[in-house]
Image: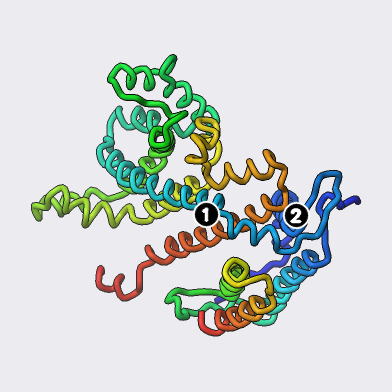
Amino acid sequence: MNLSWMAWTSPTAYFFLTIVGLLSMMCVWEAIKPGGGPRVGILRFETTRGDRLFLSLLGSAFIHLAWLGLIGSNLWWALGASLLYAVLVFKFV
Amino acid sequence: MNKPFNNKAWFFVLPVFLLVAISAIIPLMTVVNYSVQDTFGNNVFYWAGTEWFKEVLHSSRFHDALGRNLLFSAIILAIEIPLGIAIALTLPKKGIWVPVCLILMALPLLIPWNVVGTIWQVFGRADIGLLGYTMLKLGVDYNYATKVFDAWATIIVMDVWHWTSLVVLLCYSGLVSIPEAYYQAARIDGASKWKVFKYIQLPKIKRVLLIAVLLRFMDSFMIYTEPFVLTGGGPGNSTTFLSIDLVKTAIGQFDLGPAAAMSIIYFLIVLLLSWVFYTVMENYGAEKPDSRVEQD
């Protein structure tokens, strides 16, 4: 099957593989500890593990955009900030 | 909790998953791939990295279109929500006029977007349109093709005409579900019409009202067809919303890289706002156990 029209590149392939990897890990986590781990965090409403992953990914996207728009092209710092943000979301939200 | 658990259910989800993969995930992946490259056609691509994202984020054209979108959505919500509630309150609750009113209300919703744009395009023309001709006769110098205010006013009135019915029908469904006993109690207490609205009707239609707000916000934020047919984004760029700008960049200029980067940023904004509205909708109306005890 010719997929050249999709214009794949190594960085975008790694990006999507990471997303798939994260979703697979969530499936494994759910299989080990079913129920989604609901709890009420600092946002004052109930969130599950899936909600926290969604918030982490969405927030990371905006952190990268903000970094790119306000600071510069070196996105490794933005990646670091996103990882820290994701840890905080999974810990406190 | 003894919930039956059957993994065979996943097979029933599989067709939907395949459909979503083909219709949404694969195109989204392609857009992401395009957003980091440049192309002049023939499936030949050149790596551009984050160049297009930087260009879009620093583009005054993008900022202006985003501002117009937010302003438009705010105006639409400020008009359609109160107007929809007001019309729903005046509709009859029983009798022969109920189906007549509901059908009349539903009519604008049945008309396709491009037809609505065409109707108003003709309607607003001074030479052949009733609105344009009437304005001319009244001495109003109205021209949606050359005047910014007229173009915005026409698009807003067009959207109000097209979509207020949705708010009306949702609010009406909430209003007719209120038991008569509430109104009887209010009458015994001598409550005014305003008090009945504030303490009985408004709290009871809160949930459907949130759905109406969500639907109208998202739809107005992604508006494309009606303003494109009516004004084509003009005069100048005054009615160029994000979706119109996106199509101009992608198809008009064939700048697929910047258009893809713009799409992703637009998508992320829509996703964020959807999540905010969904969360508010899910949690705002939820009754706390304590408040339930108080009511009982």
Judge the density around disc 2: few (<14), some (14-19), many (≥20) Cα neighbours within 10 Å.
many
Q: Quadrant of residue B86?
A: top left
Look at mark 2 in the image and give the residue it sits on.
B34
Q: Earlier in the sequence, mark 1 or mark 2?
A: 2
Question: Quadrant location of the N terminus of chain B?
Answer: bottom right
Say what secondary structure mark 1 lies in: helix
Say what secondary structure mark 2 lies in: helix
Q: Position of residue A77 (x, y in %)?
A: 65, 79
Relative depth, front residue between B189 and A37:
A37
- What residue lies at 38% left-to-right and 28% top-to-bottom? B104
Judge the density around disc 1: few (<14), some (14-19), many (≥20) Cα neighbours within 10 Å.
some
- What residue lies at 45% left-to-right and 80% top-to-bottom? A42
Callout 1 touching callout 2 (CB < 8 Å): no
Look at mark 1 in the image and give the residue it sits on.
B63
User: Which labelled disc corresponds to residue B155?
Assistant: none
- What residue lies at 49% left-to-right and 40% top-to-bottom? B239
